[in-house]
Amino acid sequence: MALISKKKVPYRISEKLRRFLHKYSKEIAIPLQYQDLCRYIGATTLYDRYGDDTLWLSVYYSQSDQEYIFGSLKKIYALLKIDGNMSVIDHLMVDRIDICTYGNTRPFRVRIVNKINDNFDYFYVKIADASRVYGLEIEDIMSPNRVRYLVHKDTLIEEHIIGIPGDQFIKYNLLEEVNKIRLAKEFIKFNERCFVRLLGDMHSSNFVVDITPDFEEMHYRIRAIDFDQQSYEGRKNVYLPQYFKQNNPLLKIGFEVLTYESVRQYQLEERSLIANRLRASRYLLRDIMGAMMPDEIAPTNNVINLREELAQHYNNVKFLRANSMGDILKESLKQLFR
C-alpha cells in the first residue's frame, strides 16, 4: 500500500522555469490573482447529485468586489480558451465560485455559463506551485492528453479536465456493465505512464475516467487531474497507482481478466508510445528538463531515497548519480530507450 508521508508544501517557480513559461507563451498577464479570490465574505456547503458532501464550498463576495472579480474571471477564461479574444465575454457569466478547503493549495473552481444556450464550463485558480507546473507540462508531452494552463506571478490558471471522478466511477459505474478487459488495460497503461514520468498520489480522487463510445464497445481513458505530486515523494510505490487501496477495485478487475503476458504487453505498448511522444517533442522536452534538473522541488531525503529505490528496481546504478528530482526523471526517461 502506498502512503503519502506528509502534506506537501508548494515550491516557488524558479527563474529558469519562468523563462521557459515565457518562451512558450504560458506566462501571460492576467487581471486577477489568487489572493483576490480569498476575499469572500461567506460560503455554503456544495453537495453532489447524490446528496453527498463534495468537500467544496461555494463562496460569495461583497457587491463591490463581485463586479471586479466576475469581470476579471471572464477575461481570464477568454485568455485560457480563445487566446484572449474578448468579443465573447459579453454572453458569458460567472455562475459560481467554489473553494476546495481540503486541498494542499485550496484551489478555486470557477463555473462559467454561456447565457445564449446555458452551456457551462469550469476552470481553476490555484497557487502557482513549481511541482504542479512541471506536472502539467510533462502531462502535455508524455501522455495522450493535452492540458491548457497559464501562469502569472504566483497564480496558476488551469482548465477543467472532463471525466467521471475516479472514486465516483468505482462507487457507481462499476455496478453497471463495463468492458472489464478494456478498463483493466487502461489502468495498466495509466499505471505505467505515472511510473515512468514519476507522477505520485494517483489514488481514485486524483484521476477521472473519460468514457467514449467506440464502434462496438466503450473506450476508457484514465486522466490525472492533480499534478502537485510530480517528482516529489521519496518512495517508488507512491508513483504506482496500483498500490493505493482506493484503486483496488480496478486492480481486482485486472486480476480477473488479464494474464501476466497481457499485462507485460500493455506495459511495453505504453512505454513505446511514450518514447515516440518524447521523440516528437524533443526540443520542448529539452527545455523543460533544462529548467527542472537544477530546480529544488523535493526534500533532499526524498531525492536520495527515490534514486536508491529506482536504482535497485531497474538494476541501474546511474540513478545513484542523480542530485535532483529532475535528474532522476531524466534517467527514468532514458530507460525507455534501453
Image: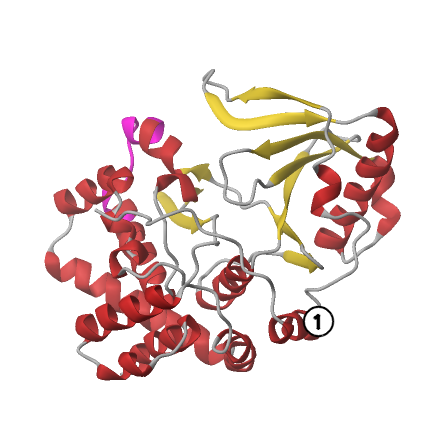
Residue 26 to residue 90: above or below: below
* Figure label count: 1
Please identify the quarter of the rendering in which residue 150 is found: bottom right
Residue 277 to residue 225: above or below: below
Residue 100 to residue 8: above or below: above
Q: Is 149 on the left-hand or right-hand side of 40?
A: left
Instruction: Answer whether residue 215 is visible to the viewer in this image.
Output: no
Q: Position of residue 130 (x, y in %)?
A: 55, 62
Q: Position of residue 267 (x, y in %)?
A: 25, 64
Q: Magenta: predominant secondary structure element?
A: helix
- SS at mark 1? helix
Q: Is residue 122 in the magenta section?
A: no
Q: Residue at x 49, y 69 (%)?
A: 296
Please identify the quarter of the rendering in which residue 90 is found: top right
Q: Is residue 181 in the magenta section?
A: yes
Q: Residue at x 37, y 34 (%)?
A: 167
Magenta span covers which residues?
Answer: 172-182
Which residue bears the numbered disc 1?
A: 22
